[in-house]
Image: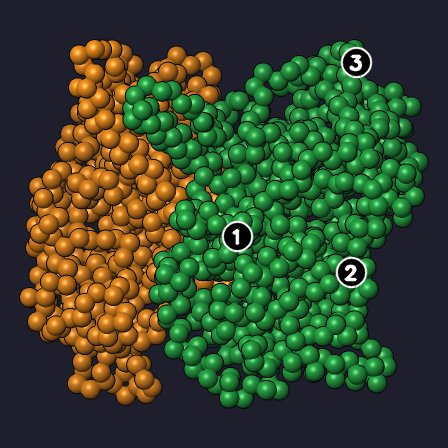
Chain colours: A green, B orange
Amino acid sequence: EIHIKKPTEKEVNPHLLPGELLLCEASMVYKYIQEDGSDRGTYGKLVCTNFKIAFLDDDSAPNENEPQFKNKIVGENDITLQCVDQIYGVYDEKKKLLTGQLRKYPEKLIIYCKDLRVFHFCLRYTKEEEVKRIVSGIVHHSQTPKLLKRLFLFSYASAAPNSTDGRNQTVMFDTLEDWRYELERTKGNVKYKAVTTNEGYRVSEKLPLYFVVPICISEESILKYEGRGIPIWCWSCHNGAALLKMSAFLKEQDDSTSQMQKAFLDGIYKTISKPPYELLKTEDLSSSLPSLQDIQTAYTRFKQLFLIDNSTDFWATDVKWFSLLESTNWLEIIRRVLKKAVEVAECLERQHTNVLLIEESATDLCCVISSLVQVMMDSHSRTKSGFQSLIQKEWVIGGHGFLDRCNHLHRSDKDEAPVFLLLLNCVWQLVQQYPPAFEFTETYLTVLSDSLYVPIFSTFFFNSQHQKDINTSGESLKIQSGPFRFLTVWDWSVQFDPKAQAFLNNPLYAEKPKPDKSQRKTARFKHQRQLSLPLTQSKSSTKRGFFREETDYLIKNILGKRIGKFINSSDEPPNSFREFYDSWHSKPVDYHGLLLPRIDGPEIKVWAQRYLRWIPEAQLPGGGTVATTAKILELMEEVQSLQVKMDEEHSQGTLGDVHSVLVLRNSARLSSLFPFALLQRLSVKPALPTSTWKDLEDEDDLVKRDDEFVDLGGEML
Amino acid sequence: MASSSTPKYNSNSLESTSSKRALNDGTNWEQNEEIPRLPGETRVTDKDVIYMCPFNGPVKGRVYISNYRLYLRSVENDPVVVLNVPLGVISRIEKMGGASSRGENSYGLDITCKDMRNLRFALKQEGHSRRDIFEVLTKHAFPQSHNLLFFAFANEEKFSENGWMVYNPMSEYRRQGLPNDRWRVTFINEHYSLCDTYPSLLVVPYNATDEDLKKVAAFRSRNRIPVLSWIHPETQAVIMRCSQPLVGMSGKRNKDDERYLDIIREANGQISKLVIYDARPNVNAVANKATGGGYEGEDAYPNAELFFLDIHNIHVMRESLKKLKDIVYPHVEESHWLSSLESTHWLEHIKLVLTGAIQVADKVSSGRSSVVVHCSDGWDRTAQLTSLAMLMLDSYYRTIEGFEVLVQKEWISFGHKFASRIGHGDKNHADADRSPIFLQFIDCVWQMSKQFPTAFEFNEQFLITILDHLYSCRFGTFLYNSEFLREKEKVAEKTLSLWSLINSEKSKYTNPFYTKELNRALYPVASMRHLELWVNYYIRWNPRIRQQQPNPVEQRYMELLALRDDYVRRLEELQITNNSKVSNSSSSTASPSQIVSQVQTHF
């Protein structure tokens, strides 16, 4: 039924953040509720600011049932300018992509968002002048190239001085101390050192201020080729084997230059293949993994499957869903990346070799693989603070070019590639395969991916530490108000109140048994707690014992002919990976030990919460894993209240406060994609496929047969 | 009671790798405790073989064959490889290689199973070593082809529960509030004289006489007249099931049938049209006219609306499952998994069956309209649709016992031809009558339980166990094609019911997350985005794919439950001691039972 509410003349004003300016607006805009293909919707005002596009409902009566999970910065009908993916105008029922200058103004505006929301706005009832202003305003501010200093990040930072302490559990890796702690934590400090060579960015603007290299590497070597050809430490395994990364030399035209570079590299390899260093294995990621272009192409196709206009669209694509998914290649890329990470883990864990990841810049796939390896091998990276520290270490300080890869400034489409999203997708596979192993939830990963497009945090809005540093002072931007104190995304209280933050914590997380109290008392530093290494000897001994003999043999072998020799990845027998993988999977899982993803075809899944959350047809009211999670939370609350009662009984009558844990009330009414996509549809009408059955091409003869060939005039059984 | 003396049968570990103690003497298995035997199970033979394990390579072992199972245990013990295969699972036994075959392990037996796996055994080439094992296996795996009885008739297990008591048609209809002033119970089929594939007890409109029913039977394929399956407690709309009308090429009409459908329509006082769901694709329904069948035409049934649900026939389903097996056994298609899966069409069929059932359920529930469901004979697709719609509408069927009743009622008593579809004990592996219709139904149920993990009292193990014993022939439950034949063979007297096994050990099959919810229609989303391949069933033999057991989420929940119970108990104890301490001064302290009841109200 068509149900169009009467527009009401009422002044509604957008909620503006500090530093946020209203740029243009239009009233009498009709926003469709994307539900059952009907024309239902609401009238309201569409505004565009220097931060977001927002739709303000005319009768925005205070919501009786305030959602349990709400973002304080970006509302349900807010789209940050960086979150806009594509804008289409509808002219006479035809969709046309809007990019630059417009000659004609559309009657309908469709905004596709990077977090996969789809907004349909009807402009037919809006004054022509306002249509012109709002459409060109939105297109201009969200789709055209921008200067860095015009990012909302700076307006916000100057208008809202950062009063938060900024110190939380996350290690930021912007100080020498942070690196030293990390070395100490992983016991890498015997063979690796944190260096200050890049102070003042003398080595390279691409490298962080501080980083870690093998002790035997000299300052001159680091400086020689701006850090290229230098193995940079990522992480050390419990057995001493280390994960390293290196920025490769570019192809040189000049023969003598390339000869010199080769000699330099040989020297480096020799140095770090000598004792006490382990045998070195190199892994050239640019040749063994899909290119950034492949990744970008795959994701572009993939996300298109989830930007659904209406119900008809949904069911039409449902028929060929699996082949559509496969043709995007996105899941296959995830599988290959996970497989590569398992291969690297195998070298570190079983073969006891150092692994050197090589990539041109060492800031894209290197980040993905090294992060994944650490998530798999270091249970500290599976805690919230540990994971955040890891992102800081490998990505933010590590120099992943967020600004370019996300194309936040719309300056160059060719640099765009969802590399960080790829990591989150891979981590999600692990999270859903091993629910008790992670301190955070899939909701955490989803909101983290959403935060990529919220320009009030500096975390994802610079290409490197250097770029952030020079822009923080404000001088290079010729802005008076510097130096800025930016917010970090890891301060989740900026986006979520405590109640909503509870959704980021996994109630199933099997916490690691805490070290006893005497040890904790001596802990002085914030990282000390993690000093004992993730792979506890006692727990994983059986698992590793399986390989012990072999490892010993390998070590002996290596000690004999180690000098001047390093293995290349191709030397390895191909089945050693499979053997490692199978043998690990045949044993019970230790959630605090090594964690290997299952990578067979049926195991790699679509991250439903992130990709399907805004599609009404895809919701299961009262279903999904949230239903079981709610039960667990309910029970936890009960256990907790019993605990309180016990304490009371013990102390005879003193009433303690009952701290309530997160409880999902009335779980039967929650959507499977909770905490997103709150159920608007309260009817119990089932979703029914509307598309028709496709032909069974090759089975025509079977299809035409009847169940049993019996002439019904004939005999009975 | 039986569990202590009977070896435990763990259906999920029909093949398992464990590190148990070594066998002392493999030849003397009468005394060997490690070889499981059911009461009534007798040894037949044993032999040294090489099990050609597709995952771990050749395994030297000894195979023990009884009248119930094939059991293999590896000679080497690290790790011990065990195969435990009920002979009923075997679909086909072939000899591979000849006496002169070259190559290692090329001479032996190749066994195709009904449960998504194949077994290969290599034997010594000299002395026709496989002849007797082949003959023994063939004889006991296919007793029907050798004039032997099913093992179910020899089974002497004892259970604390009697599964044959689970389903009593009269009490099930009473549960539904029947009979009432519009619907009556008829005994017209008491001796299966009206319809030999229907149960003896039927519910029909009050306003239709037994004479009317006989006339209608003449116009319905195999006399399967429209009878009531389920009635909505509020709308009084009903789900009726039947077979196709005998319209034929000439477009025959039958006044009694037309009137009968109108009586059904009027029974819940509905003014709108009666909805008929024909499960078949339109073209097939038309084609059926050639053999005397057809569908309800508009002219003859002006008060009815007909919809085709486009579900394919048993042959299409059989081929689809065959293709599925090809991509999952022994090796899972790796790089093009999704398109391979799509090309089997298995999940598309699941989607269509679920979509059909949702339509039926929705029409009865929110459309408040009675529906008639049929396909050709009304024992395959019809059973799928009515039972799934009932599962969606009536939460009783989502309990363990309710589901057993549902299977007993809609499938077993209404003549789903289990014997023909499964081919119990029949050597004719290529029989065109075989089809995985019931498996498809269980898969649909699994899809629903996966989408709604708190809505079902039973767990995945329950469904897997049902499927294992669909083939095993250990119980009488799924034997024979109809109630009539089952009575003739005295199945209930001479065999045990699968529900005895399950109900005697209910906790094993219980879903800890189950939350009882009355009267909530449960509609799954029949979208490929949510349908999944049931890996734990179809790919369970593959150690690489096998999923974590027990499920860690479930494990955590059980831990919490234990913790809660522990607290409740300790709290009770504490309060008793505290109460006795303060009993003189105060009597207002809550008693332990009050605390406990408070705790329970949380749920």
**Seen in the image, is A379 located left or right of residue A305?**
left
| Chain of the residue under label 3 | A
Q: Determine which quarter of the picture holds residue B59.
A: bottom left
At label 3, which amino acid type do we have? Answer: Glu
Q: Which residue is mark 3?
A: A11
Give whichever of A13, A151 is nearer the camera.
A151
10 Å neighbourhood of mark 2: few (<14), some, or many (≥20)? few
Q: Determine which quarter of the picture holds residue A541.
A: bottom left
Q: Which residue is mark 2?
A: A199
Q: CA distance from mark 1 to mark 2?
A: 27 Å
Mark 3 vs 2, N-terminal side: 3
**Seen in the image, is A515 located left or right of residue B12?**
right
Q: Which residue is mark 1?
A: A528
> Marks 3 and 2: same chain?
yes
Question: Is A82 located above or below residue A390 in the figure?
Answer: above
Q: Position of residue A414 (x, y in %)?
A: 80, 56
What residue sits 30% from the left and 21% below the top?
Answer: A652
10 Å neighbourhood of mark 3: few (<14), some, or many (≥20)? few
Say which mark, if any, is on residue B273. Answer: none
What residue sits 82% from the left and 39% below the top?
Answer: A154
What residue sits 79% from the left and 83% below the top?
Answer: A260
